[in-house]
Amino acid sequence: MTKANNFQRIRELNYLQQAVLAAALIERMLPNYGLFSEATGFGDEAILRSALNLCWEKILLPKSKISLEKQIEKIEPNVPELADFDMFGTYPAIDAATALLGLMHGLIAKDEQEFISISKISQATVARFIEYQLTVEGELADNTAVREHPLMQYEIEVLGELIDFVEQMGRITAENVKALKQHAIADGQTNIGITL
């Protein structure tokens, strides 16, 4: 499955399908933030976790009184500044927080573009991780090396599977959202292949 094909397929999903797909992708990204937070003592993963849970709830119960604006205010101080940390883990942590903020902005503004961006952010995290690894190993980190890397192939495959899952879900209910969440983290690793 080619990359363009996945993004095209996401664009063809309806608003709610795009929202749950984005949330499922963040489930795979969020633990990267937790690992960064543990390593540096910066930020509070629980705040991001709680905000993501509220996003799932808001998707299921759009009329609920959940204030995503309040959640955004809580998350913003927990986004690390690249300049403050000299470690690779800062990137995936920023990406996870950015993706989560994007999901909330998308839900507030009913903007599907935000949801589509999240799959791109996830892939960019993976690409950056592969480039970092290849450089450390003294190998050439060009586009082809990144694209053909098993981790990127896997990211594209997982995205494809999640899209399949969302397409087959039918009505979005608490039941099938739970199944989607399980499916997203079934392999027990983050989007950059760190085992949980």
Image: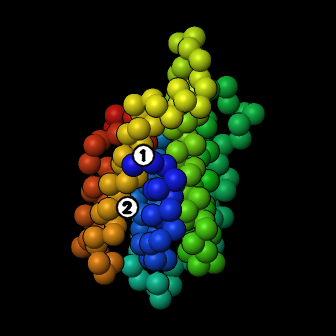
Image height of 138 relative to 144, above or below: above
Residue, disc 2: 163
Residue drawn 28% across the image and 70% down it: 168
| Residue at x 63%, y 78% (from the top left corner) | 109
What is the C-alpha distance between the residues marked 2 and 1? 11 Å
Structural crowding at the residue carrying mark 2, measured as other residues with C-alpha within 10 Å and reported as few (<14), some (14–19) or many (≥20): many
Q: How many marks?
A: 2
* The one of 58 and 152 positioned closer to us in this rendering: 152
* Picture coordinates of residue 34, whole percent (x, y): 47, 42
Residue 156 is labelled as 1
**Residue found 24% across the figure and 73% down from its top:** 175
- Residue 112 image position (x, y, % from top left): 57, 72
* Quadrant into which the C terminus falls: top left
Amino acid type indicated by mark 2: Ile
Identify whether 94 is placed above or below 5.
above
- Which residue is depicted at the point 53% across and 22% down? 133
Left or right: 178 with respect to 127? left
